[in-house]
Amino acid sequence: MEEIVQFRKFGKLDWNVSALGFGCMRLPTTDGIPLSGNINEGESIRMIRFAIDNGVNYIDTAYPYHGRNGEIVVGKALKEGYRKKVKLATKSPVWLLNKAEDFDSCLNEQLKKLQTDHIDFYLLHGLDKLRWDSVILKLGILKKAESAIRDGRIGRLGFSFHDTCDSFKEIIDGYDRWVLCQIQYNYMDTENQAGTKGLQYAASKGMAVVVMEPLLGGRLANPPQPVQALFDSFKKQRSPSDWALQWVWNQPEVSLVLSGMSSMKQVEENIRSADLSGVGSFGAEEAHLIECVREKFKERAAIPCTKCGYCMPCPSGVNIPRNFELYNDAVMYDDPGAPRMTYTRFFDEKERANVCIQCRICEEKCPQKIVISELLSQVHAVLGEGKPV
């Protein structure tokens, strides 16, 4: 296979990054359980090195990946001369920082795991407004990071993000030495989290924008039949994964697309896609197809919630729009796995659907006249109890 020939500017830096970056959150496992700590080391190392040999020059990992074992495997993969061929990115576990000194403790642990004396791009992991205010600013973490830059343990500082676009802009404007940001972005997330407005805002500030979840956790790679039929009807045939990746690469503000690859086949396919990538590769017909695909997905939503928020606040504390969003994701993508994981592992128990006492106050306020109390019971049955959609 020929080396990737497509490279892109990385913000203001005098360095070009491969269009495709290797995201190490979904490495192959020996137990077949995605994201587990039982990494198939041999195959993972083979995949990472194969990608580097074919032009990938950006490797992304993080402290918690694969039960905190991910960085260890990445460190092994970058031995035998591979470290000098790439820029290495990992992330500070912001949620574990209870005092300023914890920043250095985590960083030093990561350097040891990665078997390197420096990390090229160090990101504050999963920032939102709460963590920005209560951890980063309150504990003075930025000063600790700047100290690590001065002593050479860190090359450049950035952050990854999950919150609203307003919070995204606040974080960008709150520090003038950011070099990069990492956002979730794909053709279904143009208005979620940072979204297109955030992407463009960060780029306007000269920041490199690294895109994660271009396939929405794999859900855009295996669309339901009505969506697949739209792709099949188009004159130019591409896999759903390639359509999704090319759509992101078509955006001029995108510096790099990360893909969390779990098999050598995925690595090979993504390298071929990256070789064909470029800004302006989509014409009006391709753009129209993606718009039709987006609308077809949305048509599949089971609950007509617009997330207007008129139903909030709930007297019992239920986050009604978020519960409905997760349920709709399960139906739209014909894949309840990820929404169930979010609901049971990452969603505050006090905000879940089963907290509803069916007071129906929310139903009086809902412009869509949704029978909220009944549907919340269904949401919990599917997401919380594992019943079929």
Image: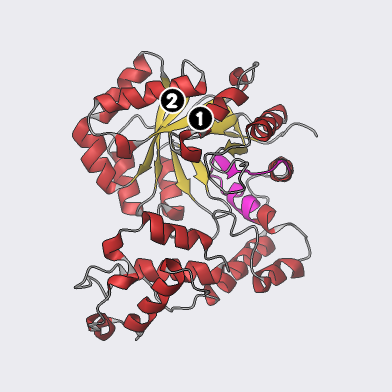
Relative height, residue 184 to residue 310 (above, below)? above
Identified at 24% across, 34% down, the residue is: 98
| Residue 147 can be seen, yes or no | yes
Q: Is 316 a magenta residue?
A: no
Please identify the quarter of the rendering in which residue 15 is found: top right
Q: Which quadrant would residue 315 be assigned to in this image?
A: bottom left
Which of 329 and 227 lies nearest the eye of the viewer? 329
Instruction: Identify the residue at the far top of this view.
Output: 151
Task: Give x and y (percent) for residue 87.
Answer: 55, 25
Magenta-drawn segment: 244-264
The residue shown at (32%, 22%) is 104
Dot 1: few (<14), some (14–19), or many (≥20) neighbours within 10 Å?
many
User: Which residue corresponds to the image point at 55% horizontal and 53% vertical from the top-left?
Assistant: 217
- Distance from the alpha carbon under mark 2 to that under mark 1: 7 Å
Q: Residues within 10 Å of mark 2 (few under 14, many from 20)?
A: many
Q: Name the secondary structure under disc 1.
A: helix
Q: Is residue 245 magenta?
A: yes
| Residue 195 screen position, x and y as percent | 44, 54
Question: In the picture, which quadrant includes the N terminus?
Answer: top right
| Element type at mark 2 | helix
Q: Which residue is mark 2?
A: 110
